[in-house]
Amino acid sequence: MPVKNRFAELLPEITAWRRDLHENPEILFETHRTSAMVAEKLREFGCDEVVTGLGRTGVVGIIKGKSDKSGRTIGLRADMDALPIHEETGLDYASKTPGAMHACGHDGHTAMLLGAAKYLAETRNFDGTVAVIFQPAEEGGGGGREMVDDGMMERWNIEEVYGMHNWPGVPTGQFAIRSGPFFAAADQFDIYVTGRGGHAAKPHDTLDTTVIASHIVLALQTIASRNADPVKQVVVSVTSFETGSKAYNVIPETVHLKGTVRTLDPGIQDMAEERLKAIAEGTAATFGGAARVDYRRGYPVMINADAQTEFAADVARAVAGDCAEAPLVMGGEDFAFMSNARPGAYILVGNGDTANVHHPKYNFNDEAIPAGCSWWAEIVERRLPAA
């Protein structure tokens, strides 16, 4: 089965939704306009139930099939939030909100799931129930966790859940997926280094925090090169180095380091946290200073369940003719909270030769819409075949 004809017919309408969302980006849980638009569309489509306010600003639409002999419910999830990036695309529908843009394609994900919801509400050619899930705050806010914690899975007895993300570099409308660990756990850390400040011309009278912190930055790289099993992935990145002084002639009293740790294995995650603290504190002590570490675990490893992944790949091959093996991704994805709560699968749909996500010149490729909508609709019709 190739792309469904209905989505070719709906493409102009879905594209218009997507571009409206792109023009009006909202960050984290502040997706008030977006959530209201989604809820309004779902009601227009004739969903049997539309619930707002889950996970603060999340929306769930319930669509019942022509029959319910199976008694089963599956979830389809899209993220809605934008990023705090100033857009540089020059598009005629570019962001109207300075400092915010849809630089990761969540506008496309939301529009595609709305298109699939419209089709499913029209046809209802399945046996069971579908929950279309529109989630806020994927970009660091943990909206998926909030929706799960609000009891979403239990409320509708969702048995399994499927998600999708566009992927630059994969041919437009083609798919890629992998079973098992897929996206990394994403942790954050702050390191506060203290010493003794003073005049830059008298370093011997100080405990130089810039030197201490520089040694910490370099030493942290040994976590990957000397502490981790070489066949297991770990990334330790210091992303901010801020001193307590902006002057040219002052050795600062304090330095604040920020960064992230990415892992795909719980044991490696434990090791990285332990070693980061030991290295920071020990290195600072070597130079006579001190370091305090605040380490916070963020999104867990996103794991695709074997059976759901095999099924999702079969559906992708039916829609696009093929489904590639996706690479491991060291980025985080809070679909992990949903796939930890219920078996699930997360797939990549090609965005073509475009700027990468999280780039000020990125734009979701509307030509991917029919394939993405078809995959979601076919997931339902094959997983819940009409009685």
Image (cartoon, helix red, strand yellow):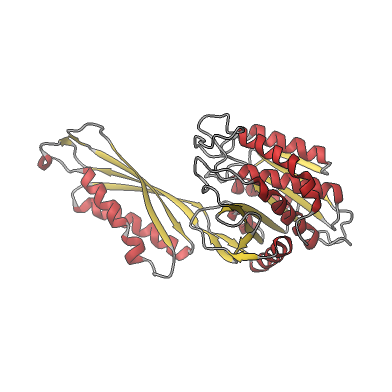
- In x, y percent, where is residue 30? 59, 34
Q: Nearer the viewer, residue 125 or 269?
A: 125
The answer to which of 215 and 376 lies nearer the viewer is: 376
Residue 134 can be seen, yes or no = yes
The percent position of residue 322, horizontal first and vertical second, equals: 67, 65
Q: Is residue 124 left or right of residue 73?
A: right
Is 142 placed left or right of 263 in the picture? right
Rendered residue at 63%/42% (across/down)? 107
Front residue of this view, candidates 109 and 319 = 319
Q: Is residue 67 above or below residue 200?
A: below
Q: Please provide percent x and percent y for residue 361.
A: 51, 41
- 19 up-or-down from 157: above or below: above
**Which quadrant of the structure image shows residue 203?**
top left
| Screen quadrant of the N terminus | bottom right
In the rendered image, the quadrant that contains the C terminus is bottom right
User: How many badges with numbers are in the image?
Assistant: 0
Q: State which quadrant residue 209 falls in.
A: top left
Q: Is residue 193 left or right of residue 160?
A: left
Q: Is residue 118 left or right of residue 182?
A: right
Q: Residue at x 73, y 60 (%)?
A: 319
Residue 53 is at least partly visible in this image: no
Residue 74: percent from left, percent from top: 74, 56
Q: Within the image, what quadrant is residue 46 found in?
A: top right
